[in-house]
Image: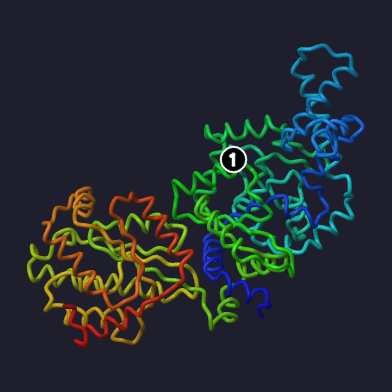
Amino acid sequence: MPSNPEKKLLNEAPKAIAHLRAQYRRKRLGLIFGAGIGHDLDFPSWPNLVARMATHAQVDAKSMVDRFKTTGSPAEKITESLSSVTQILFNHFRELHIANHGLSTPLPFVEERKIMTQWLRILHHELYRDHNNITRRKKIKNHPYLNSFLDIIRSTPITVNYNFDDTLEQMLLQSRSSGEKDTTRGYEAADRPNAQFQRNTGVIYHPNGFLFSTFEDGASAELVFSDDSFQDQLVSAATGKYLHLSNHLFRSTCLLIGLSLDDATLKSMLRQNAVSNPGNIHYIVQFTSKGALRDQEAEDAVFKANFESYRLYTIFLDQGGINALSNLIKMEDSNFKLAFSQTPPKFVYYLIGSVGSGKSTTAGNFRNLITYDEWIDERKPALARPESELSKAQKAELNTFVAEQFRKKNFALSEYFDGIHIVDRAPLDPLTFGKHRERRPKAKRLLKKITNGETSQIVKGHIIYLHSCVDDVKIRTSLKHKYWSENEYRELIENICVVYGNLEKSTVYTGGRDAASVAREVARIIFTECYAPADIGAELKLAADGLVSYV
């Protein structure tokens, strides 16, 4: 049975749960972890880690770091970022090492590498200072939510970890079955941005580098920890070095946990995805303390800013909420359906509009959702021609073909219990073509075909109308080698307004907008507006019974 936190979360963020579950089933879900998950493992925060390194005997730079604090010096305060302070610490350590060892500059490459290795050993010592093998295993096992993501990590292609420690690797190592212990470590760790992975699942990728708990097991040659490495990473990302991570964000739906969006490279890649792939939505957990007073206005502002800038859907959760999120994502379909049969998180969106309004192009921007193309079977060539040019026999053939396409799409939609679905065209569309007097008999045939003789229901859905003017439609259709008369385009647009006039819908005005901006507006409707499904089947029944005239 679902817990109260699971019921509460599904009630608060049903679209997020529906989307994440669908992507998990399709193996298109990716997890991205940040420093926040280390708090319950007693790893030092970044400020504390920098402070620890400053007091290390081989660095001995506490007094220098104190100068960048408000009370550290009687002189005017100089403010530096943590990455800048880290850079200062390394420069100080390097100069001290050169002096203590009587070295002369410029140094040979190997000597520079020795200094870097010793610097990483210091970082490793301070990072793992409070840990031993026994206590660490207990801390990992008792983490309030991390273990609930174990099955997801093990079954998804890649998990991104911006932390230096090997907690995720240790968790996978400890969870191996008796059979796996003889054949595999249970994971593959990587830090190179262009790495080829051997495993199909269980890959842990550290974009900022990593340090195994045993230093000799394979510390990264470099860590992104100071100003120069952060800037190098940003430049490298701009030149395509992190194409693998960028493609992961482009092709998958990612859930970000324990991240504060301070990493400039990650923000840059998220923004690139938002611009070039506006229909691809990712999710970020904003941590809230259990029982803390919530500021709804502030949360709404954060949600809107993250969504507009990075296409990030923000979910505000405490530890129990994060645990509930993972449970809902990985819950077996049968158990999920049994638990939430009264409130299924299923959202269907029908895209309507005239020929050339951009429906198919728009749907193509949402392949991270469950999409249904205009035609299930091979398209009939005569569909590219206006009805006025077709013979009676041709029109009859097309009407039969079109009705069958809607029947198949409706059947596919009916099979799903959850998920977010986008359908190119709605079942009333055929009534917008042809003469007015043909609408009632056409509606009868459609209703009978789609519902298998009215033994099934037409799936309700939220209608999104892509409103285009004649000039825009003429331009778009010319790109597909269609050249209808202006009157035919105008009549079709008017018919859509009439046929769908009685149903609630959201409207996107496409005039002057490119495909990306239309997709952004559609994404805003899907993910931020209330779901308002229209009863298209009931409207089609009224048309079939002659109870609406559409004049």
Tag count? 1
Label 1: element kind: loop
Q: Is residue 201 above or below residue 315?
A: above
Instruction: Decide if residue 139 is on the left or right side of residue 436.
Output: right
Instruction: Decide if residue 511 is on the left or right side of residue 336.
Output: left
Q: Quadrant of the C terminus?
A: bottom left
**Picture coordinates of residue 78, whole percent (x, y):** 75, 32
Residue at the image position 70 percent from the left and 63 percent from the top = 288
Instruction: Decide if residue 135 is on the left or right side of residue 537.
Output: right
Instruction: Decide if residue 58 is on the left or right side of residue 307.
Output: right
Which residue is nearer to you in this view: 97 or 79?
Answer: 79
- What residue sits right under mark 1 in the picture? 196
Which residue is nearer to you in this view: 286 or 319?
Answer: 286
**Picture coordinates of residue 69, whole percent (x, y):** 81, 38
Determine crowd level at label 1: few under 14, some 14-19, many 20+ residues with C-alpha closer than 10 A. few
Residue at the image position 45 percent from the left and 46 percent from the top = 275
Q: Residue furthest right?
A: 57
Identity, as a three-letter code, of the amino acid under mark 1? Gln
Which residue is nearer to you in this view: 286 or 371?
Answer: 286
Residue at the image position 62 percent from the left and 34 percent from the top = 233
